[in-house]
Amino acid sequence: MARRKKIYEGKAKILYEGPEPGTIVQYFKDDATAFNAEKKDVIDGKGVLNNRLSEFFMTGLTQIGIPNHFIRRLNMREQLVRNCEIVPLEVIVRNYAAGSMSKRLGIAEGMQLPRPIVEYCYKDDSLGDPLVTEEHIAAFGWASQQDMDDILSLALRVNDFMSGVMLAVGIRLVDFKIEIGRVFEGDYQRLIVADEISPDSCRLWDIETGQKLDKDVFRRDLGSLTDAYSEVARRLGVLPSNNVTKPTLIN
Ligand code: 5GP
């Protein structure tokens, strides 16, 4: 088989040139990083779980008409996605106070927010993805006002969908991060949800027990990350219920 052209390698994924124009193969690694890669480990099976979970969430978005990059899953660790130009922003939606917002504003983790709060961070690892305002975004030309209106609308629609899906399986969607891509169709550009949606990029707490089922398990040394992600996958029906701890090698 011909070697594929690697386009980009990030902390959790590798992107390869896709088989058709305008496509990319997204490979999910087992690497876990936190605190801007100061904490690192390889977590057996994480990539398999995130590939399946991101497929599940993106397919759900497609079903309710929220445009996203997902085309189809190729195998255990890879999915075919639309090539897009990533807007250099991390779009964070928060329903409950946690993480950096709690730290920054001194608000207790777990406090329900009066309404979803959307934040933007400038995607730059060397700067630690700093929080920015719409003023910065407009002034530095990272996105236009029309883009920002579309991004806000996409983020809130994803929040409604994800909150509902998780609530149905007894999980609270505390917050999440998405990335947005531009695709060009003739003379027009459209914004779509890109990157991934997985427990790596969400905070997910069991409604009954408050147990953390997301990357905070790794960030805060709270136990087995694959157990936590497998539990999310099992509840959503993404993995068979008798296969709680180890992702199957047969897909
Ligand atoms: P916080 O700003 O509290 O650290 O994160 C808010 C939410 O966005 C959390 O669900 C967190 O997992 C997600 N998030 C923020 N930055 C990143 C990032 O660089 N990578 C990933 N995978 N998720 C992030």
Image (cartoon, rainbow, N blue to C red):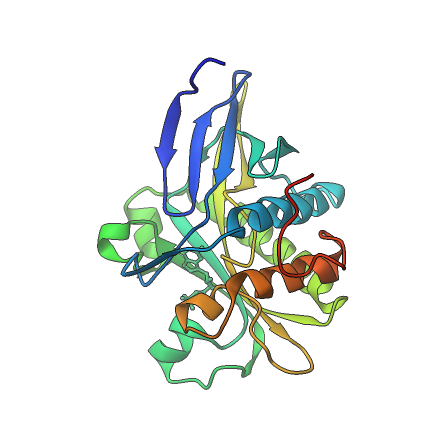
What residue appears at the point 65 percent right and 83 percent down from the top-left corner?
209
Is 104 above or below relative to 121?
Answer: below
Ligand 1 lies in which image quarter? bottom left
Q: Position of residue 185 (x, y in %)?
A: 56, 22
| Horizontal arrangement in the rendering, residue 78 relative to residue 59 (left or right) | left
Q: Position of residue 72 (x, y in %)?
A: 65, 32
Q: Position of residue 14 (x, y in %)?
A: 42, 36
Confirm whether residue 159 shows in the render: yes
Is 48 above or below relative to 219?
Answer: above
| Horizontal arrangement in the rendering, residue 143 relative to residue 213 (left or right) | left
Q: List the single residue furthest toward the top.
A: 2
Q: How many marks?
A: 0
Q: Nearer the viewer, residue 59 or 248?
A: 248
What residue appears at the point 62 percent right and 33 percent down from the top-left corner?
75
Is 112 above or below relative to 204?
Answer: below
Q: Position of residue 27 (x, y in %)?
A: 49, 36
Q: List the single residue furthest toward the left.
A: 126
Confirm whether residue 134 shows in the render: no
Q: Quadrant of the C terminus?
A: top right
Q: Nearer the viewer, residue 1 or 189?
A: 1
The picture quadrant where one finds residue 67 is top right
| Horizontal arrangement in the rendering, residue 208 relative to residue 33 (left or right) | right
What residue appears at the point 51 percent right and 22 percent down from the top-left corner?
18
Q: Nearer the viewer, residue 159 or 77?
A: 77
The picture quadrant where one finds residue 132 is bottom left
